[in-house]
Amino acid sequence: MELISRSMIFSLLNTFDRNMKKEGWDRLKKDSRQTLGMFTAGLVNFFQEGESFLYGDKLENRACEYSDLAGQRHLEAMLRSQKSIPAEWRTFCLVGIDTIWIDSSGDRRILCLCFNGQEWVLTPRSVELPFSSKRCRFVHVVKVFTLPS
């Protein structure tokens, strides 16, 4: 039996906390299949040896090599319980690549969780900007479950 710390369990909602259409983003290109439930998370270093950054189609294609990656709802769940995010993760930009929006100019955008020194903040980011191997990690949904009441 796998033991999971209750302090690192996050709860998904079936709606977005932050409606990106209200911020001028046009439509969803891709969205996570998981929209409800509880999950635990891990980080994935998605860079291959010798890569210092990825962006654009290469970034999206690299995400396709992994299963169970987090999207916007997962990051929002983590933000709602940000005290449960491990302190060791503060040095990384947590990338929610499983939800991709198209903004009004046609650019692909995702949301990331970044620690600003005091708290975690949800930050919009263009897929066309470079994602650094030193700083960025995909969030991986490790386990999905329901807690007994």
Image (cartoon, grey):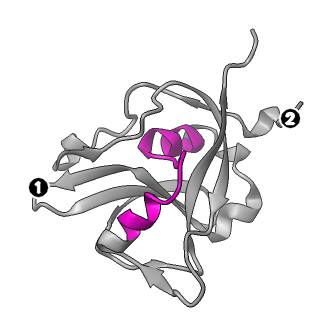
Vertical placement of 51 versus 139: above or below? Answer: below
For residue 82, side relative to residue 15 (left or right): right
Question: Is-magenta flag for residue 83?
Answer: no
Figure quadrant of the C terminus: top right
Q: Nearer the viewer, residue 136 or 45?
A: 45
Q: Nearer the viewer, residue 122 or 93?
A: 93
Amino acid type of the residue tagged 2 in the rendering:
Glu
**Label 1 sits on residue:** 104
Q: CA distance from mark 2 to mark 1?
A: 45 Å
Vertical placement of 39 versus 83: above or below? Answer: above
Q: Nearer the viewer, residue 125 or 3?
A: 3
- Quarter residue 86 falls in: bottom right
Q: Residue furthest left?
A: 105
Q: Return the x and y of residue 47 as percentages of the image width and height.
A: 55, 76
For residue 43, side relative to residue 104 (left or right): right
**Residue located 26% across and 51% down the image:** 101
**Label 2 sits on residue:** 2
**Residue located 33% across and 76% down the image:** 129
Question: Start and end of the magenta stretch?
Answer: 59-79
How many discs appear? 2
Q: Return the x and y of residue 56 as percentages of the image width and height.
A: 30, 72
Query: Within 10 angstroms of label 2, few (less than 14), some, or many (20 or more) residues?
Result: few
Question: Is-magenta flag for residue 63?
Answer: yes
Amino acid type of the residue tagged 1 in the rendering:
Ser
Query: Within 10 angstroms of label 1, few (less than 14), some, or many (20 or more) residues?
Result: few
- Does label 2 or label 1 sit earlier along the sequence? 2
Q: Return the x and y of residue 141 as percentages of the image width and height.
A: 60, 44
